[in-house]
Image (cartoon, helix red, strand yellow):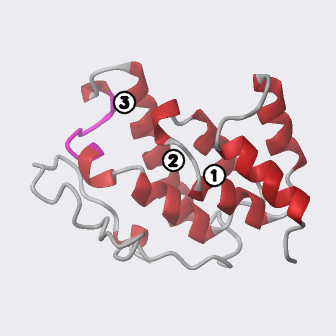
Amino acid sequence: MALSEAQIQRVQRMARDEWEASNELWQFFDTVTDSEELHLYADGFNWDTGVKEMRRVIQHPLCDRGTAFLIYWRGAPGFMARFADRSETRNPDQADHFDLLCEIEQKMIAGDFKTYQFQYDPKSDKGHDLTQRYAQVSRKRSIPNEMYP
């Protein structure tokens, strides 16, 4: 189902952090009725604000497999793979980021994302190959094969 103009505007406003109170953002997640809303939100997300919102997206029952791939690869798994586990991260924000990527890996491997409506190619994300980003970083953990669509 195609999103209405009002739905698109609401999602874009949330992704641009134009909500007036944090409960408005959480209400957004509670009232999502279409997986495209989650995908559009994730696509416009500002990663400088932390990752708790992305956790809400991947835990939402309507989160699509393609949306999870988008979040995972934009979350720089090559960079985060330099940590063997969360205890090696340098601050709470990095630990949350590490946990988010691990949760996506676990959910992807377990087949928790029920739909694959939104195709996502990390080798062609807005002109960038995200699979090669941070390729020179020494890695203590590998990116699971299941994370390559």
Does residue 139 lie above or below 86 as drawn? below
Query: Along the polypeptide, which appears first: circle 1 or circle 3?
Result: 1
Does residue 111 lie above or below 91 as drawn? below
Which type of secondary structure does the marked residue at label 1 adopt? Answer: helix
Residue 88: x and y in percent read 24, 28
Does residue 19 lie above or below 8 as drawn? above
Check disc 3 and report the residue beneath it. 94
Callout 1 amino acid: Ile
Query: Along the polypeptide, which appears first: circle 2 or circle 3?
Result: 3
Which type of secondary structure does the marked residue at label 3 adopt? Answer: helix
Residue 118: x and y in percent read 63, 76
The CA span between labels 1 and 3 is 18 Å
Residue 57: x and y in percent read 67, 49
Q: Which mark is residue 103?
A: 2
The CA span between labels 1 and 2 is 9 Å
Callout 3 amino acid: Gln
Report the span colored magenta. Answer: 80-86
Proximity of marks 1 and 2: CB atoms separated by less than 8 Å: yes
